[in-house]
Amino acid sequence: MVVSTEVARVRDGESYSVEPHRWQTRLWARIVRRMGRRWVISRHVQRYCRPFRIDGRERLRGVRGPALIMVNHTSHFDTVVALHVLPENIRSRTTIAAAADKFYRRSKRGWWFSLFYNAFPIDRRGGGAATLWYPLSLLKRGWSVLIYPEGTRSTTGEMGTFHHGVSVLALQARVPVIPIYTMGLPAVLPKGQRTPRRAPVRARIGAPVWLADAESVPAATARLERAMHSLAAEHRAMPHAAAATSSVHRRTPERVLRTLTGARRG
């Protein structure tokens, strides 16, 4: 099914694009993105997320194929951290649903986000099938999609109500949803601030959630909310000083990068 999309819309007197850069999944774009990953992702995490702790990566060992990745939204640094904690087999085929009215107002900026973050514009004003057709097509082609179910950043640090878009996509594409809960990122880059600052950050990955047996879309969304709140509770229950299973930036940058990404030399 082909759904027509509106190429440009207007908010506050400034136009923005809702048309994706479909070249973003082509081989040349993937090569450029991999070459630039250290400069647009890894170095920022290493510089500003100190100490940095990751828990739950073992829950993704059996994940194969596409998935939806949902992350609580407290900062524009969320995407950098979420991509950084994903294992390479998932990260290399992950696209990002980005707010069109924020990141695609200027063509050059939108092009940059599509190339280096594998992002595509999504209209937060809604639009039903016209909004979801592109991420659905990506999932059906074997690409994972990272999306923020709250739809906007929290200003209090508390999770907002989830929209139904993630549930609709998961049910239609028949893929699992991977929850990632982050803590500490409002201190790194709070809403309204443009310059990051160093602060402790923790990221916890949850087990993939399947929704195939959900009775309805609202029931599926409620299940996802419970999964994310469960991760938040795990965060709060863990002692701050438990370093035995932590990935902390107290080693050389090269060793830290290999630890967090699973990358090997060469």
Image: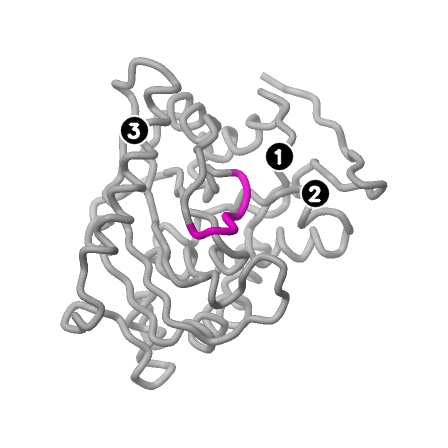
Q: Does 138 sit above or below residue 30?
A: above
Outermost residue toward the left?
244
Outermost residue toward the front?
156
Residue at position x 18%, y 65% in the image: 239
Badge 2 marks a residue whose secondary structure is: helix
Separation of residues labelled 1 and 3 (CA atoms): 22 Å
What's the amino acid at mark 3? Arg
Is 140 situated left or right of 106 in this image?
left
Residue 66 % position (x, y): 37, 38
- Which quadrant is home to the C terminus? bottom left
Q: Are marks 1 and 2 in contact (CB under 8 Å)?
A: yes
Count of marks placed on residues: 3
> Magenta span covers which residues?
151-157
Mark 1 highlights which residue? 124
Q: Pick whichever, 223 or 173, lies toward us.
A: 223
What's the amino acid at mark 1? Arg
Q: How crowded is the residue under tag 1: few (<14 C-alpha within 10 Å), some, or many (20+)?
A: some
Residue at position x 36%, y 81% in the image: 254
What's the amino acid at mark 2? Asp
Separation of residues labelled 2 and 3 (CA atoms): 29 Å
Mark 3 highlights which residue? 223
Outermost residue toward the right?
13
Badge 1 marks a residue whose secondary structure is: loop
Most common SS among magenta residues: loop
Q: How crowded is the residue under tag 3: few (<14 C-alpha within 10 Å), some, or many (20+)?
A: some
Mark 2 highlights which residue? 101
Residue 21 % position (x, y): 66, 43
Q: Earlier in the sequence, mark 1 or mark 3?
A: 1
Is 130 situated left or right of 165 in this image?
right
Q: Earlier in the sequence, mark 1 or mark 2?
A: 2
Residue at position x 75%, y 28% in the image: 6
